[in-house]
């Protein structure tokens, strides 16, 4: 098991210890600052430091069980099993993912339709909606999305059980991806609080602490991807 330190999305560095090196050159730590690819969000990149050595990490992947596997750019100099290391993530990339991921949650509020897919990359992202016809007014969508952002709503997490989720199926907006089960509890990401709450849905990704940290966004292309599928892109317009 790799303890998921990325649950604190603002943690940029952290110590750890190598517990395994996989046959394909992946590095497994006892605690991972690196978010593993999943839920449409790419794995983090960064570097590991130990005993005067350094190795760049290109991405992180989910391994067997709860292991998180860090994939180095090359395997020329690998830390040995048991080595104590310092983890450093690429913060600029991570923060971009956090801003986009939170903005996509808000996009699902502005366009209240079932989501059939999604993807996040640095500076942009998209959601696929069960949408038979294209939106009539893209400018109105962008305006509503940015209006939610500037409200500077708190973004927090809470946890429920599998049975509680079964009793509230409307919490799941994604048609193609279901929240992981089996651990006994499921993480919910909440935007806004009390009367200010605008969204609550299962999600394991990293997010900003307040919507104001997203900064202004721009609506991109709306592409037809099937009889009832429209792909909507958003872009970060500037630093928050």
Image: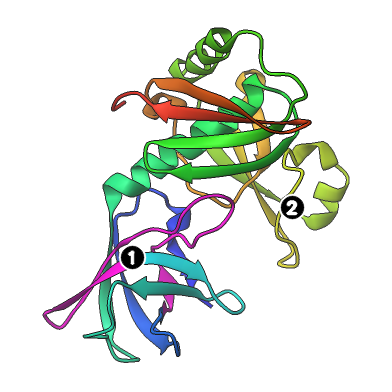
Mark 1 and mark 2 lie on one chain; the one further toward the N terminus is 1
Helix, strand or loop for disc 1:
strand
Residue receiving disc 1: 58
The residues colored magenta run 28-57
**As drawn, which residue projects farthest toward the left?**
52
34 magenta-colored: yes
Quadrant where the C terminus sits is top left
The image quadrant of residue 15 is: bottom left
In the image, 53: left or right of 194? left
- How crowded pointer 2 is (Cα within 10 Å; few <14, some 14-19, many 20+) is rated as few
Residue 23, position as x, y percentages in the image: 45, 90
Residue receiving disc 2: 178
Residue 66, position as x, y percentages in the image: 58, 74
For image coordinates 33% across by 65% down, the residue present is: 58
- How crowded pointer 1 is (Cα within 10 Å; few <14, some 14-19, many 20+) is rated as some
In the image, 132: left or right of 9? right
In the image, 119: left or right of 69? right
In the image, 161: left or right of 208? right
For image coordinates 54% across by 44% down, the residue present is: 119
Up/down of 168 relative to 15, above or below: above
The image quadrant of residue 59 is: bottom left
Residue 186, position as x, y percentages in the image: 69, 54
Quadrant where the N terminus sits is bottom right
């Amino acid at each position: 098991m790799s303890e998921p330190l990325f649950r604190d999305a603002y943690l940029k560095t952290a110590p750890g210890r190598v517990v395994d090196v996989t046959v394909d050159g992946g590095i497994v730590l006892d605690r991972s600052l690196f978010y593993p690819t999943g839920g449409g969000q790419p794995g983090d990149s960064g570097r590991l430091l130990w005993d005067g050595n350094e190795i760049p990490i290109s991405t992180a992947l989910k391994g067997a069980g709860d292991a998180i596997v860090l994939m180095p750019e090359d395997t020329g100099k690998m830390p040995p099993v048991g080595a104590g290391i310092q983890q450093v993530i690429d913060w600029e990339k991570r923060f971009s993912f956090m801003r986009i991921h939170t903005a996509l949650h808000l996009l699902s509020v502005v366009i209240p339709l079932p989501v059939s897919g999604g993807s996040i990359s640095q500076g942009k992202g998209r959601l696929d909606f069960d949408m038979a016809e294209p939106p009539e007014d893209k400018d109105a969508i962008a305006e509503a999305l940015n209006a939610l952002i500037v409200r500077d709503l708190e973004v927090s997490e809470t946890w429920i059980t599998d049975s509680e989720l079964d009793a509230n199926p409307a919490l799941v907006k994604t048609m193609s991806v279901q929240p992981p089960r089996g651990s006994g509890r499921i993480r919910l990401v909440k935007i806004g609080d009390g009367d200010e709450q605008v969204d609550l849905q299962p999600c394991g990704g990293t997010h900003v602490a307040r919507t104001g940290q997203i900064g202004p966004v721009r609506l991109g292309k709306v592409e037809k991807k099937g009889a009832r599928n429209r792909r909507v892109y958003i872009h970060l317009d500037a630093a928050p």
